[in-house]
Amino acid sequence: MSLKSCHYQTLVVASSNPGKVEEFVDFLAPLQFQVLAQPEGMQIEEHGITFAENARLKALEVATRTGYMALADDSGLCVDALGGEPGVYSSRYASNDQQRIEKLLTALEGIRERSAHFSSALCLAMPQNEVLLEVEGICRGVITNVPRGDHGFGYDPIFEVLDKGLTFAEMSSEQKRACGHRGKAFSLLEPKLKQLVMAK
Ligand code: IMP
């Protein structure tokens, strides 16, 4: 399947998370895609047990349902002392960001080994139910004792990036993009995406 036979200039970001959609619009801007948000109300069940599996599920479902190429991310935070939790359950760990942060800090109370990583799996799929590209980016760090910073979303205030001394929430969006898991995943995807666009 080539990009010729679909609406290749338009790409739907398969996410209902405004924080993520905003990051993707920034990432995709230089590639001159018309970026659309996932249609409101479209719910996709994430029953995969890996980030890659969930990204594939979302990209395929959104691409086949909208008729456009779709880019999906499945991401989350894996904490070593908790055996990789919350992992693929990051968004379901508690009912809102504040409660998720509190639950994680409580689970780590008294634990000195606080290493963790964020992972982002990206999948680009075509409306013909075909996966075109898959990559995964990782950002290592530690879970802080208390939340710090006001930017970003999710677990950003309690994730201090390795060797940076700053949480994601203390970084500008440019800084986070440069060292974050989605930024890393996107730099793996970008050259492949460019190649596809050029081969059209
Ligand atoms: P997803 O939308 O199913 O991929 O869920 C990912 C969840 O992981 C989000 O709801 C956040 O709780 C968390 N998460 C993923 N990426 C980030 C990030 O960059 N910062 C903070 N939390 C994140």
Image: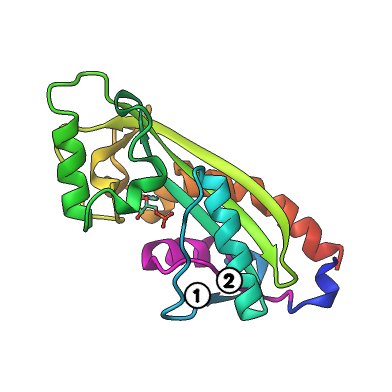
Whether residue 148 is visible to the viewer of this picture, yes or no, is no
Residue 63: within the magenta? no
Residue lying farthest to the top in this orientation: 112
Q: Amino acid at mark 1?
A: Gln
Mark 1, secondary structure of its residue: loop
Bin the neighbour count of mark 2 within 10 Å (Cα to Cα): few under 14, some 14-19, many 20 and up.
Answer: many
Find disc 1 in the rendering and name its residue.
Answer: 38
Asked whether, in this view, residue 10 is left or right of residue 200, the answer is left
Bin the neighbour count of mark 1 within 10 Å (Cα to Cα): few under 14, some 14-19, many 20 and up.
Answer: many
Q: Position of residue 141 (x, y in %)?
A: 36, 31
Mark positioned earlier in the residue sequence (1 or 2): 1
Residues in magenta? 8-28
Asked whether, in this view, residue 197 is left or right of residue 53, the answer is right
Find disc 2 in the rendering and name its residue.
Answer: 62
Q: Amino acid at mark 2?
A: Val
As drawn, the label of residue 143 is: none
Residue depicted at x 17% and y 42%: 103
